[in-house]
Amino acid sequence: MYDKYFGFRESPFSVTPDPRFFYTNTLYQEAFATLHYGIEAKKGFIVITGEAGTGKTTLLRKLMRNLEATTHSVFIFNTQLNFTELLQLILRGLDLEPQEDNGLAMTEGLNRYLIEQFKQQRVVSVLIDEAQNLSDETLEGLRLLTNLETDKEKLLQIVLMGQPELEAKLDQPALRQLKQRVVLHCRLAPLKDNEVGPYIDFRLRIAGYEGEPLFDAVAVQRIALYSGGIPRLINTICDNALLIAYASGQKRVAADMIKETADDLQLRAKSDMVHIDDSLVETPAANPKPNFFQKAPPNQSKSSAWVRAGMLWAVFFLTAGTALSVLNLNNLVGFFSEHPKARAGFELLLQPAEATGEPKLTTKTLLGDQEPRRLAISLETDSTKLQRLKPGLTPLNAERFQPKHREIERRERQSSLGNYDVVRGSFVRNMPRSDAEIIATLQPHTQVKVLSRIGNYFKVHSIDDGSIRGYVHQEDAFFVLSKDSH
């Protein structure tokens, strides 16, 4: 309804599990990598759990799009059935003819099919959504299917995707054999508050929006507050808020529209979350933390006051001792030279310039010499420049006292270049971004050349045929340095 009004190609906040709208943060990327690796490496049983609305179905559909062409997957979404019915669905998904109520014959037919696919170096996987609804009998039947194997690997890969109730079900003593066969397990969690804004922007961008931010900062905070970081709830809130903005002729979603949407959907903010302003406070904190320095109430024992006083003196002496321990300036400077990522601010005392024009650092100046001038140096992780010079100081050759961050970073970048052997499947993206498309998977026993490093990504191309070119995140780079690397 409002797509044309806001300039969308399509609805950005549909609740259907469209893999194009799959948002990847570190946790979701890990879950995707777990699934991909578990299937390609033929690990057998894989379990992914998460609360309703956290994107489990979307994750499965994204996986199906990115699996190799040699992988045949069957997607099961109806889990209100017994094992015989489930086996029939699996056979139909593999284009096999199931036999009515003959579990033995169907299992034998599935086994023959899996052996044939194995000889052709193909992988067969069964992806089961809403697995928490499967009965104990059906889960036990799935466990028996994993007995279809060779001496070295499983012939059938089974993914169980479900809500946290699935974990409780697998903890039952009757299903302990199945739980022991789960090789990989990953839990999806709601988005963090600081991820809600990027999630919204990502979906707007996929929908074709190119204008100014549609949701103001307070509106985004309220969305995080009322949704609890659940992607499905974020979509529902944003969809309704855009409808309100459209109906009122507004081009931007304000915080009051989010409050109105939450009221319409009967959503309440959790009392333990950080509130944005006074109007958002639903319930007061049950047990507010007392101010450490406040006066003890009349009914509080005097011993508590003495305890607080003792703690204050302890903090004082600890601080004083720490201050005295930094008098050895040579050790202090050496520490920050060895650890360029340290973040601190200190005043270093410099002797007046000699004939050479070069200042000298001394420890004596810290013990009362008043003649040397002061130079404030701020050691920052993201900067190597001097922040400021105190008034009255003639600028010296300050470059000599800068931490050699750039030199160290350049050495790190250069040291990562060269030829590498791939030891585990590694994802290659078309751009050095977490939301970029995965265009290929580097297989074990292949060789790649690392051309450069951009942030946390390595720019690589395959050495064997050169057909794979792209970017690999450092956490996905399962490489070892080749003997012939230079």
Image: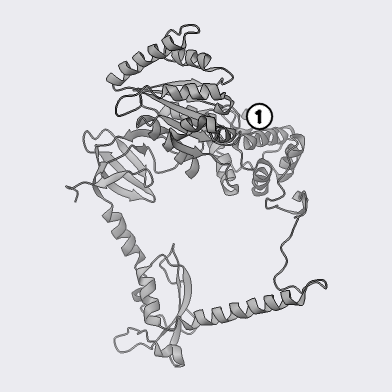
Residue 388 drawn above or below residue 102: below
Residue beneath the point at 50% across and 32% down: 59
Viewer-side residue, 137 vs 219: 137
Q: Position of residue 386 (x, y in %)?
A: 43, 72
Quadrant in the picture for the N terminus: top right
**Residue sitting at 35 percent across and 87 percent down?**
353
357, 470: nearer the viewer? 470
Q: How many marks?
A: 1
Res 314 visible: yes
Percent across and percent down for residue 77 are 54, 22
- Residue 25 makes an appearance in the image: no
Vertical comparison of 339 with 273: above or below: below
Element marked by disc 1: loop
Q: Amino acid at mark 1?
A: Tyr
Q: How is the image coloured?
A: one colour
Q: Residues within 10 Å of mark 1 (few under 14, many from 20)?
A: some
Camera-side residue: 360 or 475?
A: 475
95 up-or-down from 79: above or below: above
**Residue lying farthest to the front in this orientation:** 173
Residue 88 in the figure: left or right of residue 218: left
Drawn side of residue 57 relative to residue 266, left or right: left
Q: Residue at x 51, y 25 (%)?
A: 139
Q: Horizontal placement of 118 versus 305: left or right? A: left
Q: Nearer the viewer, residue 265 or 383?
A: 265
Q: Residue furthest left?
A: 484
Q: x, y (%) of residue 376?
A: 46, 78
Left/right placement of residue 4 relative to residue 354 reads right
Q: Position of residue 35 (x, y in %)?
A: 43, 33
Question: Which residue in the protein does label 1 denote?
Answer: 2
At horizontal 72% and vertical 34% (from top left) the residue drawn is 244
Is the residue 256 above or below the residue 247 in the image? below
